[in-house]
Amino acid sequence: MHQPEHILPDEADFPWVTATAGEQGTEELGRRLGAVLGGGEVVLLFGRLGAGKTCFTRGLCRGLGIAEDVVSPTFTLVNTYRGELVVHHLDFYRLGGDTPLEDVGVMEILDEVEEGRAVLVAEWPDPLLGELKGLQPVYSWLGVAGAQDQQRLWRLRSDSPEADHLARELGLHREKGPDA
């Protein structure tokens, strides 16, 4: 199977940032996010291989009371977890832009999210972006290596009116813009 090219978004487009130390710090950030989700949210995770996207998702699931093992859906494409909410964890790393999303059940998942009954978390989400029009809130996270060993910088962007409140609640700071 031909691997699609994955181009990361520009860090400058992500005004909110926080640093985490190791897997534990990344998982804790995800846990804090999961603890404030109420259903209907879309969480998009960008970052190179090894950036901590699945670790972040594991923490998000823990924040929603999901105790089962959270693993990367790279080969299954979709993992579904049930806790306080349903979490659909998708990974589009191996999919090209020509793969019909209906084949992996994305349309049903989006309906469930739109109805507020689930949260969608997507790694390598580029093939999904065109299907998200009208869904709110959509939180895009970019994980990049920090200056110190095992450090990650997690950057957030969102057009959602709740984004500033969420970012502050999670301890992120604004690097750019009027509140910088």
Image (cartoon, rainbow, N blue to C red):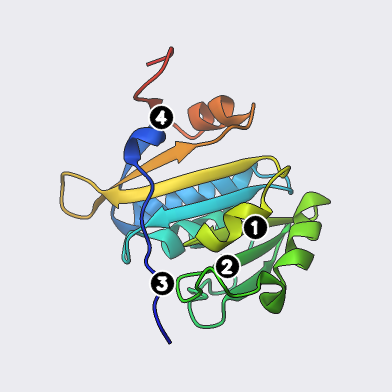
When the figure is inspected, residue 78 is found, relative to residue 117, above or below; the finding is below
Q: Which disc is residue 90 wearing?
A: 2
**Residue type at tag 2:** Leu
**Residue type at tag 1:** Leu
Residue at x-position 73% and y-position 49%: 39
Asked if residue 147 lies left or right of residue 4, the reply is: left
- Disc 1 marks which residue? 120
**Residue type at tag 4:** Pro
Q: Residues within 10 Å of mark 2 (few under 14, many from 20)?
A: many
Looking at the image, is mark 3 or mark 4 earlier in the sequence?
A: 3
When asked about the image quadrant of residue 162, the answer is: top right
Looking at the image, is mark 1 or mark 4 earlier in the sequence?
A: 4
Q: Which disc is residue 15 wearing?
A: 4
Residue at x-position 53% and y-position 30%: 169
Residue placed farthest to the top in the image? 178
Element assignment for label 3:
loop
Element assignment for label 1:
strand
Residue at x-position 49% and y-position 26%: 168
**Picture coordinates of residue 95 (x, y %)?**
51, 74
| Res. 18 in view | yes
When the figure is inspected, residue 54 is found, relative to residue 45, above or below; the finding is below
Asked if residue 174 lies left or right of residue 36, the reply is: left
**Picture coordinates of residue 64 (x, y %)?**
64, 55
Element assignment for label 2:
strand
Q: Are marks 4 and 2 in contact (CB under 8 Å)?
A: no
Residue at x-position 28% and y-position 55%: 22
Looking at the image, is mark 4 or mark 2 earlier in the sequence?
A: 4
